[in-house]
Structures are given as C-alpha cells and as structure tokens.
Image (cartoon, coloured by chain):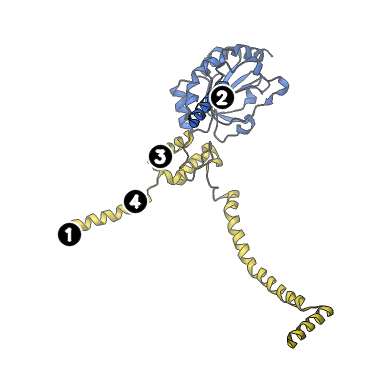
Amino acid sequence: MKRSLLLLLALALLAVPAVAQALTVNEVAREVRCVTCGTTVDISTSGFAAEVRTKIKQEIDQGKTKQQILDDLESQFGRQILATPPKKGFDLVAWLVPGIAVLLGLAAIPFITRAWARRRPKAAGTAVALSDDDRRRVDEALDRLGDA
Amino acid sequence: MAIGVGVAVLVVILLIVGLVNRRNDGPRFVADEVLAPAQRKPAPVYSLPVLSAGGTVRPVGSQLSLANLRGHPVLVNVWASWCGPCRDETPVLEGIWKRYAGRGLTVLGLNVEDVTDDAVAFIHKYKLTYPSLRDGSQKTKQQFGYTGVPETFLVDKSGKVALYVPGPLTPADISGFDQVVNPLLKT
C-alpha cells in the first residue's frame, strides 16, 4: 500500500513539470500583434486574432515550440506580427538602448552630485558679500537690538 | 409628462436622422463615380506571391506585380478568409470574372491580414476561379489606402485607380458595371 502511494507520488511529481511547462495558446498569443487592430492577439476580439489563435493551437498540437510558431507567423506576415522586436540584428537596439540609458544615468550620478557640491560654497560666498551700505545698515540694526 | 414628451421628440429626431442617412442601396459602380484620368493615382506595384492562379496570373507561388497586368483594367478585391462579407461577395466577383475575362478585364483577389492555409482553404471552399495574390506584410496597404476588408479598386490600363468601392459588393452594386468598365476596356 505504502509502496503504491510512493509510486503515485513519484508519478505526480514527474507530471508537475510537464504540466507547468506545457505551451499554451495565450503564452504565444501575447507575443503576437493583431495586424487589424494593433493589440496583442491574446486580448483582441477581431476575426484575424481568432484565426491566428486557431493556427497557434494547431501548431502547438503539432509539437512546435513557441519560437517555431513565432518564426512561422513572421514568415507569413513579416516583423509587424511580432508584439516585441526580436532579440537579434538591428532590432536588438530596441532592447539594449533602455538598459544602456539606465546605466549611463547611474554612472552620471557621482559626476552630477560632485558638480552640485562644488557649486554650493560659491553660493554661500555670494550670500555674505554684502555691500558697504548694507553692512552699515546691518550694524545699525544690531546696535538698535543691543540697546533695546 | 415632460420626460414623455422629451422621449417622443428624441424618437422623432432619431427617425429623421435614420431616414436622412439611410443606406444607399443603389449601384456603387456608376460612371459618375469613376475618377477622371488626371485625378487617378497609381496603384501599388509591389511583387507579391500568387496565391491562386487564374487567367494570365500564374503559376501559384510565383511573384507577380500589378505592373505585369498593365494594358488591361484590373478589378482588385482586398479580402481575408475570416471576413464574413468577403465570403458573401464572392459570387458577385466570380460573376464579373466569368463575364469579363474574355473581354480583357482581370478580377484579382488581394489576400491580406490572413493565415495562408486558411486563405487557400477559402478559395477551394468557395470554388473561386479568379486569381489572388497574397500580401501578408501589407506592402500595398498604404498606397491603396484600404482600411479593412473587403474593399475593391478598379485599376485602369495604365495602372491607376479609377474607382474605389469600400465594403462588400452586392448584385445591386454592379447593375451599372458595363457603363463603368466598357470605357476602361476601350481606352
């Protein structure tokens, strides 16, 4: 009995990854753009999107991988069918530029803060540079306070 | 009482608007709608794969451009297999093709926004004998200016668009087709 339970448990554990890794229509469809309406095929209600979802289902049933299905759709409709640009060739720029921009921004922070820090003493110096007239008025005001 | 009168007035206004904007059931292929030669714009001439053969458009899989068909008017019908109205208008297009093919007019389907296998199945299911090209990447969309399916363009002998008919074709639309196409076949 115990052995049977253990066997069942082992089989269940083996099955979990297969179920978790099974490719779904929506998993592919969310990476495909509906050329008639501009949204992704997983949320579009257009006739074209329905047709593409059926095709995705057929190709999943044939055992094709996500990339194979996307490649097939790209060969039929061109790159416009892909919701995100492919990570190769010139399209790689679209993926790299945001990361590079963030890195450049982070790298610039020390330089910018140093520049601000350098500017601050100058600002303080300007504040104390009173004209002779102003200095006389300040002294007079302080004298009056002292007398009071 | 006031609400009732308001609703009644609204209904009357809607009826008037509906009558003024009622669908025009008359033919849409009328000589008056054909653009003067000087006003016509060139149809796109991209090379596209032949999806189904017919007339001089062949063989399937070869590349063909509208430029190859110059010298004869061409009725270009933009369609997709998932589009119900495209299915409804096929008898009209088939009728035009059978009637005018011998007189020099080519009816040419332009399959867009469609899965190739489904498009081919559609052609077989509805027994279409006029040829079709496939424009999967929508090369021709901008130049033709179509916004959906089905839409139809009558291209003259010099490759310029003489008439544009949005929406599905009905038998009523083509009652005046002779008057439209005969001058284009002659000039």
Name the residue rendered at 51%, 42% in the picture: A39
Q: How far is disc 1 from disc 4 in space, using C-alphas?
A: 25 Å
- SS for tag 3? helix
Q: Which mark is residue A18?
A: 4
Q: Position of residue B186 (x, y in %)?
A: 67, 12
User: Tag 3: Cα neighbours inside 10 Å, few (<14), some, or many (≥20)?
Assistant: many
Q: Which residue is mark 3?
A: A57
Q: Are marks 1 and 4 in contact (CB under 8 Å)?
A: no
What's the CA distance linking mark 2 and mark 3?
46 Å
Q: Which mark is residue A2?
A: 1
Does label 3 or label 1 sit earlier along the sequence?
A: 1
Q: Are marks 3 and 1 in contact (CB under 8 Å)?
A: no
Q: Nearer the viewer, residue A5 or B174?
A: B174
- Whether labels 2 and 4 belong to a single chain: the reply is no
User: Is the same chain shared between marks 2 and 3?
Assistant: no
Question: What count of labels does the image hold?
Answer: 4
Q: Say if B3 sits above or below B107 in the image.
A: below
Chain coloured blue: which letter?
B
Instruction: Tell me, by letter, which chain the rendering colours yellow.
Output: A
Residue type, label 1: Lys
Which amino acid lies under the numbered mark 4 shown in the image of this protein?
Ala
Residue B52 in percent (x, y) is at 51, 25
Quadrant in which the N terminus of chain A is drawn: bottom left
Q: Chain of mark 2?
A: B
Specify the amino acid type for callout 3: Lys
